[in-house]
Amino acid sequence: MSAPRKLRVATVSLAGCFGCHMSLLDIDEHVFALLDKVELDRSPLTDLKTCGPCDIGLVEGGVCNSENVHVLREFRAQCKTLVAMGACAINGGLPAQRNHLDVGQCLSAVFQSRPGMDTAEVPDDPELPLPLDKVHPIHEVVRVDYFLPGCPPSGEAIWQFISDLLAGRTPRVSYPLLHFD
Amino acid sequence: MALGASQRVDDVLKRFGERPEYLLQMLIALQETENWLPPAALTALASALRLPRARVEGVVGFYSFLHAQPVGRYRLLFSDNIIDRMLGSEVLMARLCHNLWLAPGQVSEDGLASVDVTSCTGLGDQGPAMLVNGRAVAALNEDRIDIICELIRQKLALDAWPAELFEFENNIHQRDALLSCAAPPGDALQAAIAMGRDAWLNQVQASRLRGRGGAGFTTAVKWLACRDAPATEKIVVCNADEGEPGTFKDRVLLSAHADLVFEGMTLAAWAVGARRGFLYLRGEYLNLRPALEATLARRRADGWLGASIGGAVGFDFDIEIHLGAGAYVCGEETALLESLEGKRGTPRIRPPFPVTHGYLGLPTVVNNVETLAKCCLIALHGGAAFAATGTAQSAGTKLLSVSGDCARPGIYEFPFGVTVRQVLDACGAIDTLAVQVGGAAGITLAPYEFGRRVAFEDVPTAGAFMVFNDTRDMFDVAHNFVQFFAHESCGFCTPCRVGTSLLAGTLDKLAEGKGSPADLLEIEDLDRLLKQASHCGLGSAAPNPVIDGLQKFRPAYERHLMHADFSPAFDLDGALRRARQITGRDDAGAHLPQQPEASR
């Protein structure tokens, strides 16, 4: 009998700090067990630039610009199960602290009014994604199946969560793995 | 602070004996003269009462009728219950704003007036209604709105306005034991005094009277526990904070049968041995206060309040009226007690229950207006006679506040066990699509359930009975109720504070036509969370209209859905507008479609 098909997993960091991905690597020796069961699709670990059909998508970070929207929609379209991983994906997190500021003023403060940059223009290269006026949690842009809280979620919590998903169980992360006090 | 103002602060302090538990009453009194609560006045109150200033400010911030910022000289608040909306309140509000040249929620430039909405003002049978500086005006129509505008433009003081503006009807359409009770004041009390305290309590026990405020707790059990609680001083509180949208029976009892209510409170005091009583009157019923004070004064003069009531030596009891200030949650008994103590109306953790630790820690009986009025019937005719009507578990009659799509909205008194259809027939409702029994926190009944009975064992209610005919959208009804809960959440516990707002936000999204099947799942999740994790009944009842709606009127919700998997609630392309503007870009990459390409 042949071994069961390996599940395909994609990961991405949108408006995040890669802390959740660091935490994912923090599962230590479980990495071997994980790689026995999954194949990575688009992910900072594979450096693939587009996402194929996947079983699980892990999304770190909120949605701060148009590129984030496109990537997130690609993930939603390709991944059977989409997971919001960490505080920024769930609430907008730290990047959302700019939400009470006007994004236009932010851009001009950074590119025009800083000392030594008085003559500079706000970059208008079409290659650059435009920032949204507010940073949104990912569930405000696409449907999300699961939320894994934490800033970042601990390696253990991520491992517990992924093992449940891989085994076909409803993920349950116990309280000791979630509390921070 | 101006000299005059500081003098008025001192007057208020003196009037309430500088007791901190009267803080809320002081603030209400002060606002009456100052029109708002200036920071200097709050500081003066705080230092005189030896309270932290933050405590005083916290109280001001909690009650929606108290203002820490200057407001218009005339504050016009439209009752925003779904029934008022069905009667055309939104059009009238737009007319008023247009006439006065202002936008809802703003103070006019000359500081003359502000127009906004408030929760149900308890005039659903004669809406649309509004409050003018706290005083209710019912039966609004275009003429009345124009008259009010003119009075405001003339800057006439409220006392000089035509008195008929502030009058309202009782609209009693069906009387039973309570509403046809014509016993002269004092008779019930005399009968109970003649029985003696213990025999009187036995009669209450025999009557199987249960609380009429909604929860239906057995009154005699409450009174016994309070009587037996170890303390020298006991308190009786009448809960007249009738905030449940669509309920107005207490308003009618207090205007037409105030003697029965006060006599009921005195009967409770006789049973438990209380010396002090409070009537906690919701701020919306300010109009009733002068008449209630006059009734109290008459009862004192007649010897039915005060010392040695009815000649019984040692039976001393008196009642004072405390005002609320626009907080629905204060209808919950422990929140009400906090409010009576001059604090924010945050529900307490129970146990201990008020019967042992209530007002200022003293054993306290808190009863609904109707419950107390019913006690007079028990004293007059005996407990067995009272228990003879109604059903096995719900003795006696129930007052129903009928409003909405029917020919004769008003008060109906029926014995418990009456079917919903009987009530609909009595009030002249035709083509009825649904009935909301028990107010926003109650239960939505579909036509197949109109055979169900109003009683604690089937459809319990505090008295609201809102009728919707088949031209109404039950989604709009639930949407209105959820907005109400989000507004009235006291903010103490996160599940309710955040949950009610999220639920309201999701329903807003559906109302704007941006909903998707995923949002219905989200609503079901929020419903579960609110039900299970809230601190008090407000949060756990908040999703009721949506739960019932999704179960019984799902097509009304599905009409609001897009057929997409998911669509954002906000305008994605609009969110890039500011960045496009600052970068001067308008290329394809500078735009976002609202739906992913593939699913469009």
Image (spheres, grey):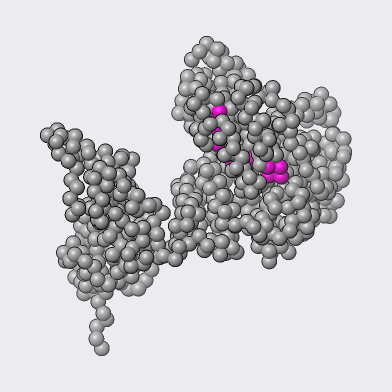
- Return the residue found at the far bottom: A1
On screen, B211 above or below B544?
A: above
Residue occupying image coordinates x 29% and y 57%:
A69
Q: Is residue A64 left or right of residue B470?
A: left
Which span of residues is magenta-colored?
B113-127
**On the rendered structure, is B5 left or right of A3?**
right
Quarter of the figure with residue B338 = top right
Residue at 40% x, 62% y: name it: B566
Q: Give x and y (percent) for residue B163.
A: 73, 27
Residue drawn where x is 26% and y is 38% of the image:
A105
Instruction: Note whether residue B372 is visible.
Output: no
Residue at screen point 19% across, 53% down? A126
Q: Where is residue A68 shown, x and y percent of the image?
A: 27, 56
Residue B159 at least partly seen: yes
Note whether B335 is above or below B547 in the view shown: above
**In this orientation, which residue lies closer to the viewer: A51 or A46?**
A51
Q: Is residue A148 left or right of residue B68?
A: left
